[in-house]
């Protein structure tokens, strides 16, 4: 009888272990891609890979010593692939698919090969197309891109600066003035009035709250009538938004309207906007686009001549700067609260940093503008901590401004990545994790490498690297310069679509030990395992990591019992026993949670 009970318990235990969504992959052979040239040709022919991946894989073979394929054969195939890319540029250009033609042309340029159709010509055709549309923000985004590459005539560069001046956007004007007066030495000679524009804007202070409030709206998510405990109630949530264009486009938070765009939500929902000038009229609104990563959304109402706010530049903000939060807290309309920038280094998002502010923020403020002392938008309020007064958060406009053109494209905003974990170390960007079968691994990245530049732009922080890479077109090829042990390498990587939660992609593809390195910043050396646990020795604990905060020490043993993703609450849970620095004589079993939206993935 006892044996039967024991057997039953063992079976149930094994079933639970294997049915739980946890990472229990062994330390055996990890997945790798095939290297052979014939295999690459076959996969490209069958469209299992694209031309960019074919190039990366072939180039890796060419760079490896002792490859089975002859160097001549591989080298010829690499040149053939460049020829195919040239043909794709011409085909897409002839078919007026200028966005696609540009991806191929920029990729070929990365390979130090001049496209037969000049990149400037492709940009100009794309600009002509945007000029015929009403998509102003994408027009400006493309002008900036061309100006940065010195592909705009000086007259068009002047138009960029003149627009910032007319909109009284002092932050953008000052930054563009410094950059483009250097890139285009003839700019100030031809347009000396820019110097007076600069002086005028530097002294600008237009903090007119009555005018600002006219641009701020109330955003309502109506989910109809719901019943709870036999009682019917109106299910309507409140947020804030503000006009960014005269034809009725409004920025707000994604979480304000999230159910309306969530494919899993099956109930009724509708979005409305209420303006200050007509507080009794609920105007139907359309959700144009949304960005779950930065918690922003773009709405559209039928409106002409809407009053807009001046969009500012959050990079110029300093600790202690005076700010104002505007919104509709708990339904109290047109409320202004004030405070200062308390912190600029809050790791709230998967990319970049958030502002901590001490201005009062309550439910209903979400999506409202954060205004500086010159009356310009430098962020979007998105969260407060109700039980702690004076702790609220805002999205820096540095990141919002990059997302706006993609919001206008419609649907969910997407970005690109290469599948590498990076961290700040001595004012450098160090790679400490490479995902199996990801773009970084295929390009030859290895843990320990330092990223020096991305697409020719030097980077020194994680935020620099993410900002340079995440917003580029994809799929396409990019050059990332790295250094390892004094040797400089140019890694040609294929940019691919970044999943909403990159950690989960890694979780589904990598082994437990390496996932702990990525998420908790702890490098482990395996030495024993059984069905219930795995024993390791801690090789390294990265400074500032979750592992360091949990007191895990280097050169000490650690037993891992479980590592799992709790989907409903969106966190990773590591259960382990170890001797921590605050109780080095006692080994304890603890569960260490980690928010799934970690912000050190490139």
Image (spheres, grey):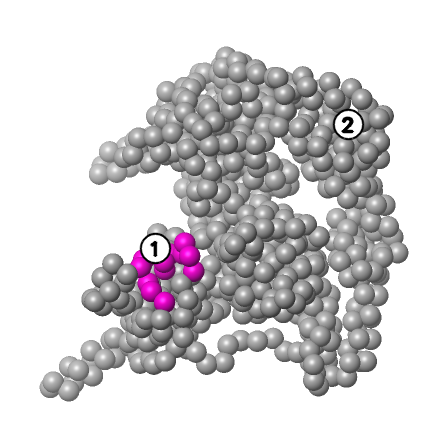
Q: Where is residue 556 in the image (x, y as percent from the top left)?
A: 32, 71
Q: Nearer the viewer, residue 50 or 574?
A: 574
Q: What stretch is highlighted in magenta?
A: 542-554
Left or right: 228, with 407 as reference point? left
Query: Between disc 1 and disc 2, whose residue precedes?
Result: 2
Label of residue 32 in the image: none
Can residue 543 be found in the magenta stretch?
yes
14 up-or-down from 440: above or below: below
Q: Quadrant of the N terminus?
A: bottom left
- Who's the residue at 73% across and 27% down the image? 161
The picture quadrant where one finds residue 588 is: bottom left
- Who's the residue at 78% across and 48% down the image? 98
Q: Which of 276 and 440 is in front in this view?
A: 440
Few, some or many residues within 10 Å of mark 2 (<14, 14–19, 20+): few
Q: Position of residue 28 (x, y in %)?
A: 46, 81
450 up-or-down from 152: above or below: below
- Who's the residue at 59% across and 23% down the image? 310
The picture quadrant where one finds residue 365 is: top left
Few, some or many residues within 10 Å of mark 1 (<14, 14–19, 20+): few
Residue placed furthest toward the left: 1
Label of residue 159 in the image: 2
Give SS at disc 1.
helix
Q: Mark 1 points at which residue?
A: 549
């Amino acid at each position: 009888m006892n044996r039967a009970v024991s057997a039953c318990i063992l079976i149930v235990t094994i079933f639970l272990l294997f049915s739980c969504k946890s990472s229990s992959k062994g330390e055996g052979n990890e997945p790798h891609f095939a290297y052979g040239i014939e295999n690459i040709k076959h996969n490209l022919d069958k469209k299992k890979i694209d031309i960019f991946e074919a190039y990366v894989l072939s180039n890796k073979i060419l760079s490896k010593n002792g490859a089975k394929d002859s160097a001549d054969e591989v080298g010829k195939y690499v040149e053939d692939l460049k020829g195919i890319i040239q043909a794709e540029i011409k085909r897409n250009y002839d078919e007026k698919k200028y966005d696609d033609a540009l991806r191929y042309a920029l990729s070929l340029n990365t390979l130090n090969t001049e496209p037969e159709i000049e990149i400037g010509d492709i940009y100009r055709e794309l600009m002509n197309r945007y000029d015929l549309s009403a998509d102003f923000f994408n027009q400006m985004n493309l002008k900036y891109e061309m100006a940065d590459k010195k592909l705009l005539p000086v007259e068009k560069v002047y138009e960029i600066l003149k627009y910032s001046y007319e909109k009284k956007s002092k932050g953008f004007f000052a930054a563009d003035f410094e950059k483009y007066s250097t890139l285009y030495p003839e700019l100030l000679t031809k347009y000396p009035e820019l110097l007076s524009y600069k002086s005028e804007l530097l002294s600008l202070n237009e903090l007119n709250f009555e005018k600002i409030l006219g641009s701020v709206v109330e955003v309502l998510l109506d989910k109809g009538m719901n019943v709870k405990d036999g009682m019917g109630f109106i299910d309507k949530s409140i947020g804030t938004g503000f006009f960014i264009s005269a034809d009725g486009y409004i920025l707000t938070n994604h979480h304000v309207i999230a159910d309306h765009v969530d494919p899993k939500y099956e109930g009724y929902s509708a979005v409305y906007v209420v303006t200050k000038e007509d507080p009794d009229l609920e105007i139907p609104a359309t959700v144009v686009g949304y960005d779950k990563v930065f918690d922003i959304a773009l709405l559209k109402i039928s409106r002409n001549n809407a009053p807009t706010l001046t969009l500012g530049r959050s990079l110029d903000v300093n600790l202690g700067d005076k700010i104002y939060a505007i919104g509709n807290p708990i339904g109290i309309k047109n409320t202004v609260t004030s405070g200062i920038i308390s912190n600029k280094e809050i790791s709230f998002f998967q990319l970049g940093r958030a502002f901590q502010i001490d201005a009062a923020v309550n439910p209903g403020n979400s999506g409202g503008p954060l205004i500086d002392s010159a009356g310009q938008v430098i962020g979007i309020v998105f969260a407060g901590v109700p039980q702690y007064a004076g702790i609220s958060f805002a999205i820096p406009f540095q990141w919002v401004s990059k997302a706006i053109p993609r919001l206008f494209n419609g649907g969910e905003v997407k970005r690109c990545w290469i599948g590498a974990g990076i961290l700040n170390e001595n004012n450098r960007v160090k790679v400490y994790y490479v995902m199996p079968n990801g773009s970084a691994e295929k390009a030859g990245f290895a843990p320990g490498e330092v990223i020096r530049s991305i697409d020719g732009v030097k980077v020194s922080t994680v935020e620099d690297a993410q900002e340079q890479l995440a917003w580029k077109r994809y799929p396409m090829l990019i050059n990332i310069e790295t250094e390892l042990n004094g040797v400089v390498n140019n890694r040609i990587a294929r940019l691919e679509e970044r999943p909403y939660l990159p950690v989960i992609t890694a979780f589904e593809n990598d082994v437990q030990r390496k996932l702990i390195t990525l998420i908790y910043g702890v490098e482990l050396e395996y030495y024993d395992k059984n069905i219930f646990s795995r024993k390791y020795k801690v090789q390294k604990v990265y400074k500032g990591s979750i592992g360091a905060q949990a007191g895990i020490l280097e050169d000490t043993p650690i037993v891992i019992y479980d590592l799992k993703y709790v989907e409903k609450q969106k966190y990773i849970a590591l259960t382990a026993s170890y001797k921590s620095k605050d109780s080095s004589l006692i080994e304890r079993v603890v569960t260490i949670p980690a928010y799934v939206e970690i912000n050190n993935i490139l």
